[in-house]
Amino acid sequence: MRRLQRQAVMASLAVVCMWSLGAPAWGEQGGTILRPPGIPPVVAQAEPAPAAPAPSQGPTVLPPGGTSIEDLLLQKGSITMDEWIQIRAEQEYSGAESARRIDAIEDWKTRTELLPMLRDKVNFGLNALQFLYSHQDAHVPEGKSQDNFSIRRSELLFWGRISDTLPRWHALMEFQSINLGRETPTGGSGAATGQPIASTFFRESYIDFRPFQSWAPYMNFIRMGIFRMPFGIFTETSGGLRDIISSPYLTSVGSGNGNRTGSAGTIDFLQERDFFVDVRGKLFNRLEYVAGIMNNNNFHANATGANAPKSFYTRVRLFGTDVSWISFTSIQGESNNANTNINGRGKGAFDRYGLDFRYTSKIIPGLMVQGEWWQGHDGSNQTTVGRPANGACLDQAICGGSGAPGAQRRTWYVLGKYLISDGFLQNWEPTIMYEQFDPSTSMSNDLYTRTILGLTYYFENFPPKVQSKIQFNYEFRHHQGNGPGVPYDTTFDAFAQNAFLVQFQIRFM
Amino acid sequence: MIRMPRTIVLVIFLAVTACAPVQLFPTDATNGVDKEFDFTAWRTIPNAKTGQKVQLGGRVVQANGRNGGLIIIATQLPIVQQPAYGPKDMGRRSGEFAIFYAGSLDPKWLKPGNRLIVIGTTQEAKAVVVDDVQRSLPSLAARCLHVWNTGGKEIAEFPYNAGGGYEPLEEDTYCVPQ
């Protein structure tokens, strides 16, 4: 910059000299010389010695700023006083113009700096825009295809930071969540099924509140609202950051209605979102904790009844290194089968116990292995959303539901991936995952298993905010059946037939 | 009767250790460190305080390799205890300084925006090129570096990131072998 400035000064000097040389000629030619009337034109070089400021008198008559270039030129007689005045006038004019421009820019800068967007108070981003192609081997009803194109997610995210006391607000809109959620009416099997009554465009909305700055990070903040629950790893991970395309079975598995074995039907073992308030912090610089209470009725609860039986949850996460951990989660409470928005829930005691780990290798950069193990009890007479249910009795004519006794469920998975960071396979990431889901540990012939082979290419990979990628997954799926002695046909069961999926994703915020 | 005092002692011990200050550097590196070093004065007259062992927080501006070592240009940031220990951007403009680290680091630690705390000895101002402009910056020879791979975000924003993803913050300490 200084070199440029020096060059600019030298160029200015040269221009001034040229101007002083050429001005009389231009004046004679064009008559536009900037010279006060009555003063004869003066050519510096031809100026007689007496007319030029004498060295002895120069310093005494010079105005302030005697060290500037034009002052030196004046002292040396290269320019006349008129020219000196003209140069100074030009300089003052251009200086005033520059100051005016700078003032205008400063004014705009002050205004724009106040914009909420530039103060981190309001931000928006694309949580995930996913285009999915899937092929499933399972047969489909007449008129449907085994090959599907779909927009898997189209989620816009808004968030901001108000102050140290309110370090974050967050709202996520899912623009394709236009399907109406069904109610689960109260009644026996003879009652009418539930009607579609509500949709939820906003998937997530929460507020973080840090009441005491000095308590952080030991008691870091209180989070309240609806968001991904801190249950293990997958549940808490945004769809835009997941390593495989399909959701794991611990989120949801199976299709259709339940039966008396408790093994059939759709089972939402762990809801991804819920209404909750919890407190989060970090101790010993190694142990993170979360403790809170939730509605236990999924994210539709605003529409279909927020006051479901509550559940308490805790998670402690112990870090071995900065990026590797093991954690334990516990959920304790009650669940109901009437007015629920979660499949597979019965009436009565409800619990979940989870163990998860992640190992991010520092020895082999790019290698990551994670896993989760979950077990939990659902009360008797579980129901499928929309199906009438009322109470824990197993007489379906009176209590509806599945008529199944309470069930102990268990699931686990292990996932490994390796991001190639150099060579011609740079940015490719092979992934492998194996998982099991046992709908009822006391029943046989009901196990779900799946092996996923995946390959991901990252166009941009700066998680958590930027991740654009294409994923290829092949899923080897197997489903034993719906319990002992229950007739079962795999032809139309999507959980028993293999599938191939390709997903293109953009995530940017 | 004996069990009760033991329990109380255990609870007090856990409470004290849970809230104990974070120890990032080996003890021998932190011995004699001036943690209240006046950065502003040093920045104004860099050569007046040479040979002083100091601890400074900052944000990585750029990093270049030179003679088997690294020159990291960082913007000075205050080190805070809350809401998370480490350098925090307060929004005020602060000065830059140069860190000479006699070793190498994985490029991921040198990304612009990453937060760091350095323990080192002040040296005379050095001429360095920042954004293609030659500048004279106060410099120090690093003994130890602790870097958070924040990519420009605040340390306190981790691990519960905007966008819904549990993202543990990578951090590590590197020291020059003595």
Image: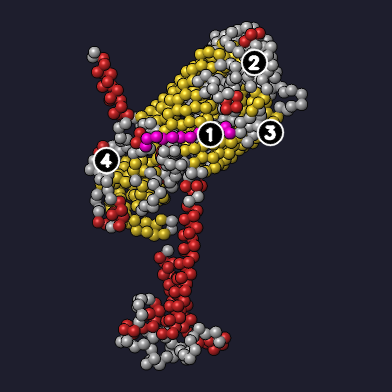
Determine if residue B63 is in view: no
Amino acid marked by disc 4: Ala
Name the residue that disc number 3 marks. Answer: A149
Q: In front of the other: label 3 or label 1? A: 1
Read off the magenta span: A202-213
Name the residue that disc number 4 marks. Answer: B29
Q: Which of the two residues, A352 or A12, is positioned nearer the viewer here?
A: A352
Q: Is residue A16 positioned above or below A5 on the image?
A: below
Name the disc covering residue A23, or none.
Answer: none
Residue lying at 62% horizontally and 10% vertically, measured from the top left: A399
Amino acid marked by disc 3: Phe
Q: Position of residue B174 (x, y in %)?
A: 34, 40
Q: CA distance from mark 2 to mark 1?
A: 30 Å
Name the residue that disc number 2 marks. Answer: A388
Q: CA distance from mark 1 to mark 4?
A: 45 Å
Q: Secondary structure at mark 4?
A: helix
